[in-house]
Amino acid sequence: MLRHLYLSPIMSTQQQIRNIGIIAHVDHGKTTLVDCLLRQSGVFQAHQATVERAMDSMDLEREKGITIKSKNASVQWHEYLINIVDTPGHADFGGEVERILQMVDGVLVLVDAAEGPQAQTRFVLKKAIEQHLPLVAVINKIDRDFADPDKAHDQLLELLLELNASEEQFHAPFLYGSAKDGYVVRKIGDPRDNMVPLFETVVEHIPAPVADPRAPFEMLVSNIDWDDYVGRIAIGKITQGSVATGDIIYSIRPDGTHERGVVSKLYTFRGMGTSESTTGGSGDIVGIAGFADAYIGETLCETDSQPPLPFVAIDPPTIQMELRANNGPLSGRDGKYVTARQIRERLDREMKTNISLELSDAPSGGGFIIQARGELQIAVLVETMRREGFEVLVSRPEVIYHEENGKRLEPFEDIWLELPNECLGDVMQALAARRARTEQMTHHGNNVHIEGVIPTRGLIGFENFLVNLTSGRALLSHMFRQYDRVCGAIETRTTGSLVCTTQGISTAYALDQAQNRGKLFIGPQTEVYEGMIVGENPRREDLPLNPTRTKQLTNVRASGTDKAIQLEPPVEMSLEKSIEFIGADEYVEATPKHLRLRKKILDATKRKRSAQAEPV
């Protein structure tokens, strides 16, 4: 929701406005840099309490340390108004970045001094270069151990060459600094004082928005927000003309149809929040309320005869998952919204603000197919729904195949790996099993850098496997490359499941014997049901067991016959880890209080008959 600051806005002329987007790979310090700019520009008062990563307003963003939703802020530096758009740094949320680039007149490219340009930097930089946006480069975290700013500088220049940057973009100004410590310098040896060099560089090298203030009003809707009092708010950059509260304007859809509306509220971004304004001028980023069904990609304009503005096409999704209403024995105990109708309404609302997702009905009926860029994007949606009170079943991710000239095609992705030398053999073996093709390998110190191509199918579950294999010391980045011919069968899971055979409460006695058969996902005194997955079997087949069994008591007792039961701690399964683990015949049951794994068919007899009926 928009945060309102009812302040008297500082009016800026068009030549005093700078609209910039910040693009970087995940965890390269993008949001921390925005925090620093906000503090040093005086947005936060001396007595005002502030939090780290103020732009990450979602709970999930703070927990995961990544930006999920793009957000707007602005700072007033001298007479200049600098509108800042913070964009996601994970490739799965690239759809947010693509449309946000249409609101800005330049980009600030942020690169970690130790890691150099990564997958998301490459992806968004390519989009910015295609739109001919001027660049300002910042090498961040130069105070970090093993930081090599000169190498990061050279790597970014090489990337610009590879992406066919223009002469102006290739000669973009480079700055060096540490957002954490609050300074940026033009040269490594300069005094490390504050962020003034960055403010000066943005004003000098990022042009003012090009717009005709005397032309009829026109704005492309690039983002949607919601307010409990005024409803949907269309956010975008005014490309020409001006608008005021009470004006009659039109919403032109991409298909040419239009809708008449009245501007009921007008918001401009000031600091971390918004302020109500009576007018919005050309070149500024504003929010307009007055259309109940405004969508991203529509054009708001003064007359109904104006043609719609072009909207950059979003790359197609490559992954799909099925969502269903929870029909398990424990359904309805935790959540408030448990029916398929309520889930469909919630997904329809999500589709209106997240245009990189696609929704359809499942062929089998009763479920919904969500198509997205990656499994993390859907996992974040499911986690958000959990916290809102929904109960859902989630299937394993599947890639989206295409048919072209009678050939079946599947998505492939570029992959970048940074890992310790001692793990190289095991990782290469795993990549080969997942049909990956290594294109380049570079050794530096105790680490090795790998670049290659892998089918998207091979990436499903690979990140969790890599974390376990390297004890969390590996870095993985990936980016969609192209659709190509299906490369053959890939076995991404070599283990089975420990499946519960009855309903009840698990006991320490039963789990003590079950833990010898595999890793357990539950502890004692956990409510279980038939068909629920309670652990992982190291062998490929599923193994039925009864975790509710109790010890039979007799009147005979002997000293030392009863041993103390010592259970290993159960494996903690997050939502992302659960989605990667489950097989094609399994679901993740996500409720506000619990995450359970289960078979799609709970009854063991019906499950066996269904498996026999499937074609070999």
Image: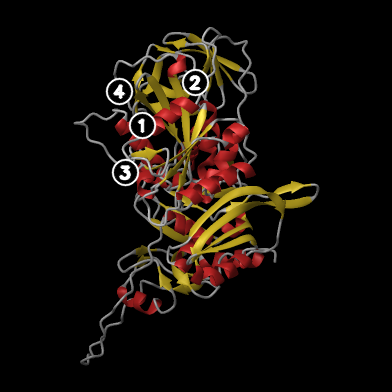
The residue indicated by pointer 1 is 196
Work out whether mark 3 precedes mark 2 in sequence or the reverse, and give the earlier one. Answer: 3
The residue indicated by pointer 2 is 208
Given residues 347 and 459, the one toward you in this image is 459
Q: Are marks 2 and 1 in contact (CB under 8 Å)?
A: no
Classify residue 31 by image quadrant: top left
Residue 141 drawn above or below residue 295: below
Work out whether mark 2 precedes mark 4 in sequence or the reverse, and give the earlier one. Answer: 4
Residue 235 drawn above or below residue 34: above
Q: Residues within 10 Å of mark 4 (few under 14, many from 20)?
A: some
Image quarter (top left, top right, bottom left or bottom right) of the C terminus: bottom right
Residue type at mark 1? Val
Residue 460 drawn above or below residue 506: above
Estimate the x, y position of residue 174 in percent, counting from the top left. 48, 38
Q: Are marks 3 and 2 in contact (CB under 8 Å)?
A: no
Estimate the x, y position of residue 367 in percent, counting from the top left. 54, 46
Residue type at mark 4? Leu
Given residues 432 and 422, the one toward you in this image is 422
Residue type at mark 3? Asp
The residue indicated by pointer 3 is 181
- Give me the disc on residue 549: none
Estimate the x, y position of residue 101 in percent, counting from the top left. 53, 31
Measured in 3D between alpha carbons, the distance from the residue under mark 1 to the one under mark 4, in whole angstroms, is 26 Å
Given residues 503 and 181, the one toward you in this image is 181
Work out whether mark 2 precedes mark 1 in sequence or the reverse, and give the earlier one. Answer: 1
Given residues 388 and 253, the one toward you in this image is 253
Q: Secondary structure at mark 1?
A: helix
Measured in 3D between alpha carbons, the distance from the residue under mark 3 to the one under mark 2, in whole angstroms, is 29 Å
Estimate the x, y position of residue 403 in percent, counting from the top left. 74, 48
Q: Secondary structure at mark 3?
A: loop
Q: Residue furthest right?
A: 405
Q: Determine whether, in the image, residue 210 is placed left or right of residue 30.
A: right
